[in-house]
Image (cartoon, grey):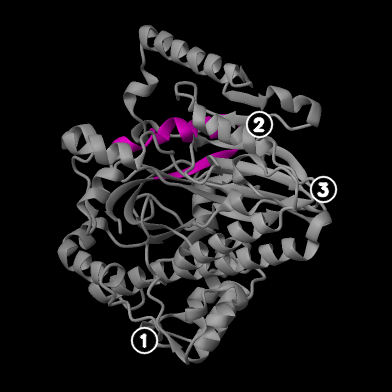
Amino acid sequence: MAKSSTAQGANPGVKNRNKKNRKKDERKRARVFAALAREGLDIRREGAIYRVRRRESRARDVPVAEVLLPEDFRLEAKALRQLASLAGARHPVGGHACRVCASPDFHPGDSGVAIGSIVETHGMVIPGAVGSDINCGMRMHVVDVPVDRLLARRDEFVALMKGDYFFGTRDLPMSARAMAAMFRGGLPAWLAAAREEPQGRARAVDFAQLERELERVHLGGCLEGHERWAPPDLLEGELIRDGGLATIGGGNHFVELQLVEEVLDRRRAYALGVRAGQLAFMIHSGSRGVGKHIGAVWRDRARDAWPTGLKHPEGGLYPLSLNHDERELHRYLEAEATAANYGFVNRLLLAELLRLRLRELLRMPALEAPLVYDLPHNITLPRPGASQRWITRKGACPAGREQPVIIPGSMGASSFLLVGHGSDRLLASASHGAGRARSRFSMGRRGNKQDEDELGLTGVDCITLRAERRIEEAPAAYKPIGPVVDCQVEAGVASVVARMRPIMTFKA
């Protein structure tokens, strides 16, 4: 079996740099090392692994943070500072970071936590390490329909999906009972309640199929939440019309149609129902306004819970400690689970709207379009088999043994379906994408001056209502996906099952 096949998803120039460019990269890396050393950060490199720690933290038993990074990728000083700060997180009454690492899509985060960070904590959790995009994640389906058949009706399809995703024709009201069930018990509870009294477009849903697909959702799409943490307006009235549910969201979130272009592991692909030549669709979204609400509430509550008179933590990352206030820690986990449950349902409904439109447009009411997998990449979960320990992933997804992993490229590059190996290298985690090479601000300021080829947009079919979104999310804004995937395969984190090529991408 081939180890990986990422050449078509990578920028050829990255792998074929000449010696002159390599020396230039080494000089740049040396300058970053020297600058960070002056700030008190020690950095060591061993192959694809970079280790970073604050010099003064050695006496405090702070873990060394590790980053798995492709050889030719540049180090970003801000992201390294953020990772070192995360490694130093601790609570004065008890609780500390045990392990900190980062996946190859590592880059600075706006909230003070680097994207790609994975932290194991003992006796505490850090609400700010997840932030407000709780249970942002990926969902992938495959469809046994020739791509040409859909593209022949491309304009009709786009008009229908723009209506559902952007113009509010999705018609998905929810009873107060179903809404509360969703917040408490995620997908299984919502399905049971919604099936009894379906509303709007939900009347066309095949609930039996959705129930069968629960086994393809990470943790069954069910965490222990409670509606008391939800935005109050989502609990008022008998019939609730939530303007955020079944919406994509901004930034790097998307719904994308793809072609399964190559299968590299036939045995695993067969088990997942994936074959070369299939149409696929991939969804990247999360808990939307619910996560934003809960994240903001707990950013303030964690700060207010900090022991009076003690020095505040670096970077504004306020942990909640079992020893200091066990009840408050478990309240946060319940609140995060509430938003996570909403995120699972949001992705399901985004997929279901697309599946219903395919059945309608292609006049195939029995079209199955089965789920391959759904998994989160912004979430806090208990460490299996370890008491009072949690693993928080920020822009990194679980990659347990034989568990499917979905790593998208940009809208101009391949995406990959893999299976994890449960490797301890990244705490049984994998990257959630390629990672940004240029900020949205930089793309908005300089990208408008570049042509389609420079931006990587030639041939890209991007459907959006905002012209600036196309520039902000252009392929040139992202690192090449090939080295990101290859690096993880070589490190034993995961194995490639299939590669998908983008056909059209919906961006809010």
Q: Is residue 426 visible?
A: no
Tell me if mark 1 has few (under 14), some (14-19) or many (20+) residues whose alpha carbon lies within 10 angstroms of its own.
few
> Residue 426 in the image: x percent, y percent?
64, 38
Q: Which mark is residue 10?
A: none
Magenta highlight on residue 498: yes
Query: Gap in Å between the C-alphas at discs 2 and 3?
Result: 20 Å
* Quarter in which the C terminus is drawn: bottom left
Which residue is found at the position 49% from the left and 42% from the top? 109
| Front position in the image: 508 or 104 | 508
Specify whether 297 is left or right of 61.
left
- Which kind of residue does numbered mark 1 sit on? Gly
Q: Which mark is residue 65?
A: 2
- Dot 3, how many residues are within 10 Å of its Cα: few (below 14), some (14-19), or many (20+)? some
Question: Which residue is found at the position 17% from the left and 68% from the top?
Answer: 156
Q: Are marks 2 and 1 in contact (CB under 8 Å)?
A: no
Say what amino acid the circle numbered 2 marks: Ala
The residue where tag 3 is placed is: 94
> Mark 1 — residue?
200
